[in-house]
Amino acid sequence: MSSFAPFIRLLDPPFALRYNRAVRIIGLTGGIASGKSTVAKLFVARGAQVVDADLIAREVVKPGEPALGEIARHFGATVILPDGTLDRKALGQLVFDDLQKRLQLNAIIHPRIAERTQRELGALAQAGVPEALYEAALIVENNLYSGFDGLIVVSVDEPTQLSRLKAREGLSDQDARKRLSAQAPLSDKIKVADYVVDNSGPLAETERQVDQIWTLIRSGGPKRRNP
């Protein structure tokens, strides 16, 4: 997942989620290397249903999926590994600094991500699930949170975030800072959050915060409803 994460975080789908309002959707986001996926797993362990945008984005480019063939035609065979799977790291490097190429890639994968997301949310609604978390990286940057029933932001102090990113991706300090600058500052995300999980400290403290937030969500919070 590590080589794929920067690619997804740059290309989160800017589409409006249209879902059955019987399911309350709480967004879950955070900065790169903030521990968003770890926090999502903690919510799952407590019974939450999570729709993972990163996972869906990986699924729609698997071998046999139409998107993979389109990507190969647009970007060349160099982004396909010998086993026929997508070389996510190579593709991420190719599009990182090229807006036109990112737009081309968006046009290929976003409609498929949107369709599969709607399918998952529809299945949750049919199953009578009262609330679900939508985990994605660029919820705030793409203004998706305004259509949700709440927003959780996973926060971490910048030195820890930078250290984690460099270790996880094997990046230089300069490249890691470049990745951080590709997203909105965590302070901007916190401003629009209904709940904040500070993931800078020990796991036990993160778990305590998740317990508290999940209790509030299950009780009907946050108390807002968008038109």
Image (cartoon, helix red, strand yellow):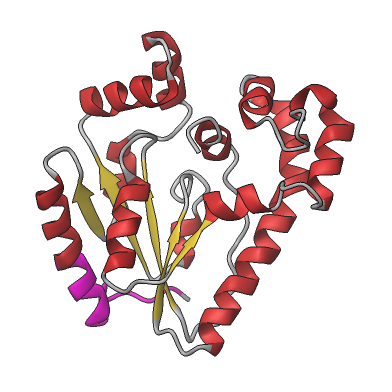
Residue depicted at 72% across the width and 48% down the height: 62
Residue depicted at 28% across the width and 47% down the height: 154
Highlighted range, magenta: 212-226
Residue 95, how many percent across, how many down? 68, 25
Q: Is residue 67 above or below residue 31?
A: below
Residue 110, how many percent across, how many down? 69, 51
Please tell me in which quadrant of the rendered image residue 168 appears. top left
Q: Is residue 223 above or below residue 45?
A: below
Q: Is residue 83 above or below residue 179?
A: below
Residue 21 lies in the magenta-colored region: no
Please tell me in which quadrant of the rendered image residue 115 appears. bottom right
Residue depicted at 55% across the width and 74% down the height: 121
Side of 95 where 132 appears, left or right: left
Residue at the farthest front position:
83
Residue depicted at 66% across the width and 65% down the height: 116
Side of 206 where 115 appears, left or right: right
Please tell me in which quadrant of the rendered image residue 226 appears. bottom left
Residue 208, how many percent across, how many down? 11, 59
Q: Is residue 66 above or below residue 102?
A: below
- In the image, 43 versus 158, the foreground residue is 43
